[in-house]
Image: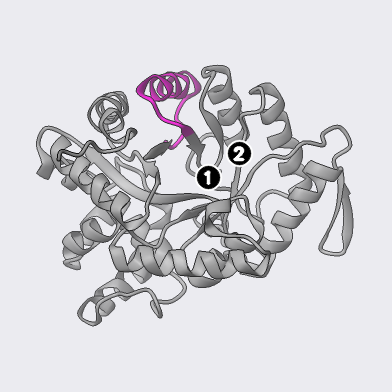
Amino acid sequence: MKHGIAMLPPAPDTYAHWCRLSEEAGFDVIWVPDSQSLYRELYVSCAICAANTSRVLLGPNVTNPLTRHPATAASAIATVDEFSGGRALFGIATGDSAVLNLGLNPSRVDEVRDYVLAMRGMLEEGAATYRGKPCALSWHKKRVPLYIAAEGPRTIRLAGEIADGVTIGCGLTPEVVADSLTWLEEGARKSGRKVDDLDVWWLAKVNVREDGEQAREEIRMALAASAHHAFRFTLEGKRVPDELRSAVETLKKEYAFHEHEMVDKQTNAELVDRLGLREYLLDRFAIAGDAAECVKRVRELEATGVGALRIAAHVHDKPAFIRAWGREIISRTNQPQRTTS
């Protein structure tokens, strides 16, 4: 199992410390969120991460087509790639808190397609057309892997068709994983590829503590974020139980996106409990509990075809969490499971 971590960028010195700890803990990737109204600036944070690590891959997970023109983003990620010694990745999606906090609507799937193709053209060939107009990047001609974050069939198929990798956020239950892999295969087939040709990551809201119940309690607001994001456009085809559809619709309407994934805010955490969704969302989106519970869950996910976890570390004590996840989970799941005869 590969492990990548996303941490909301705080003050630069603190973020540098977290990045060093994450590399020491054994994480493979450090993903950097992009939400200008809530967190520190994306590409400055990428540079901080690059300057304080030497092994991990790093980059946006995710930016969006609305707040950054692809020519600007291409130049930024190319600079990060140059500065980091070729360790950059680039992740994009339709947009959530970054655009909602500006009073904008998320992008359409076809707009994500156009953006990714423009990025690829500029990064690899130095030029592209975007929305009918030329754009260029004259000084960089090197492939930077492009990832799409996706929660539904159309976007997952798009990732399979045109991206180098995907972060799937539909959930972690066996049925949802199977659906997601089917959609990904359908998209990959359109461009003559297979799922194995893509770098596939699965979004998980996680926490590990000695007290498993406290670990689950702490990430309630992150569970709300996953539900809001995965179900915001439609519930159709998303395998939401009939008896919970009304509660999920209410969560979508009342979700406080100005507190998106902020661990020190309680509005969204309280919303999860008020609607009686905690257990369902834990089962669908989370790996949380004591060390034994988390390792067991990771092993179960491996059996369904999950091979890489993009974890969201929305907890109060980040250094303690990073060390614990490395010591208790990464060290026990990044090697094939031993069997006895």
Residue 8 lies in the magenta stretch: yes
Q: Secondary structure at mark 1?
A: loop
Q: Position of residue 25 (x, y in %)?
A: 35, 23
Residue positioned 48% across, 33% down in the render: 30
Give the label, 2 or 1, closer to the camera.
2
**Residues rendered magenta in the picture:** 7-29
Q: Is residue 267 visible?
A: no
| Residue at figure coordinates x 35%, y 67% from the top left | 176
Q: Secondary structure at mark 2?
A: loop
Check residue 89 in the rendering and tell me which mark sits there, or answer none. 2
Q: Which colour scheme appears in the figure?
A: one colour
| Farthest residue, direction front | 341
In depth, the one of 214 and 195 nearer the eye is 195
Check residue 61 in the rendering and tell me which mark sits there, or answer none. 1
Q: Are marks 2 and 1 in contact (CB under 8 Å)?
A: yes
Q: Residues within 10 Å of mark 2 (few under 14, many from 20)?
A: many
**Count of numbered marks:** 2
Name which quarter of the figure residue 304 lies in: bottom left
**Measured Cα–Cα span from mark 2 to mark 1:** 9 Å
Q: Amino acid at mark 1?
A: Asn
Residue visible at 40% across and 78% down? 237
Question: Image check: 128 left or right of 318?
Answer: right
- Dot 2 or dot 1: first in sequence order is 1
